[in-house]
Amino acid sequence: MKRITFFLSLLLSLTGSALAGESSLAKTWQPLMSLGESGLYIREVTCHQWNYPGPGADIHLIGARNVPPTDDPEHAKEDINLASIYGLVFEIGGADDANPEVTLNTTKMKATSEDGQEWRVRVLRASLECVRRVAVEHKLKKVPLALKANDADKPWLEPIIAEFNKHDLSKPFAERPDK
């Protein structure tokens, strides 16, 4: 009887983890704004993911909102993930988790007049450094990145995406990823 109970428990636990709709905590990398100064930090963060485990989810979460826990919820309510703030979305396709198909969707990329083009480039390059770090952690040799962009942004985006696609993932992509 004990064996039957053990095997039923094991079967239920394995079945439960295989079903969709289960959430878990996942780690990814995000380009975060520094608080109190105008800087950018790339940090590993923990996210609550619902869709699918593995490198695809970790790459997708690079663009997820990040409102960290706080001891002052009245004042600390804003998203600190620059990829999310600027509207970068990493879309994942394909069924092969070892070689996820990644599309960087920049059609809703924002920039204010005070930010200028330089910050857009910094945030983009830092976000691609996050993709590189996830790839290294999951031992992916390549993460071919496709681009979905507005026609006006393609002339400055396409060369950066081409550079990333040729880049050796064992070496940092962003010039100064961390402060």
Image (cartoon, rainbow, N blue to C red):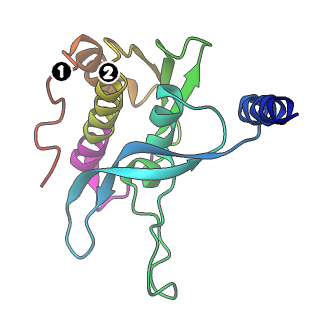
Q: Residue at x 86, y 29 (%)?
A: 4
Depth check, front residue: 130 or 119: 130
In this view, the mark in front (2 or 1)? 1
For label 1, count other residues whose C-alpha is less than 10 Å away and answer few (under 14), some (14-19) or many (20+). Answer: few
For label 2, count other residues whose C-alpha is less than 10 Å away and answer few (under 14), some (14-19) or many (20+). Answer: many
Residue type marked 1: Ser
The disc, 2 or 1, on the residue closer to the chain's N-terminal end is 2
Whether residue 142 is visible, yes or no, is yes
Reply yes or no: does residue 110 show up in magenta.
yes
Depth check, front residue: 121 or 155: 121
- Under circle 2, the secondary element is helix
Q: Which mark is residue 170?
A: 1
Question: Which residue is disc 2 drawn over?
Answer: 161
- Under circle 1, the secondary element is loop
**Horizontal and vertical percent position of residue 138:** 37, 24
118 sits left or right of 120 in the view? left
Residue range in magenta is 109-124
**Horizontal and vertical percent position of residue 69:** 46, 72
Name the image quarter holding the N terminus.
top right
Quarter holding residue 81: bottom left
**Horizontal and vertical percent position of residue 119:** 25, 49
Name the image quarter holding the C terminus.
bottom left
Q: Is residue 94 above or below residue 41?
A: above
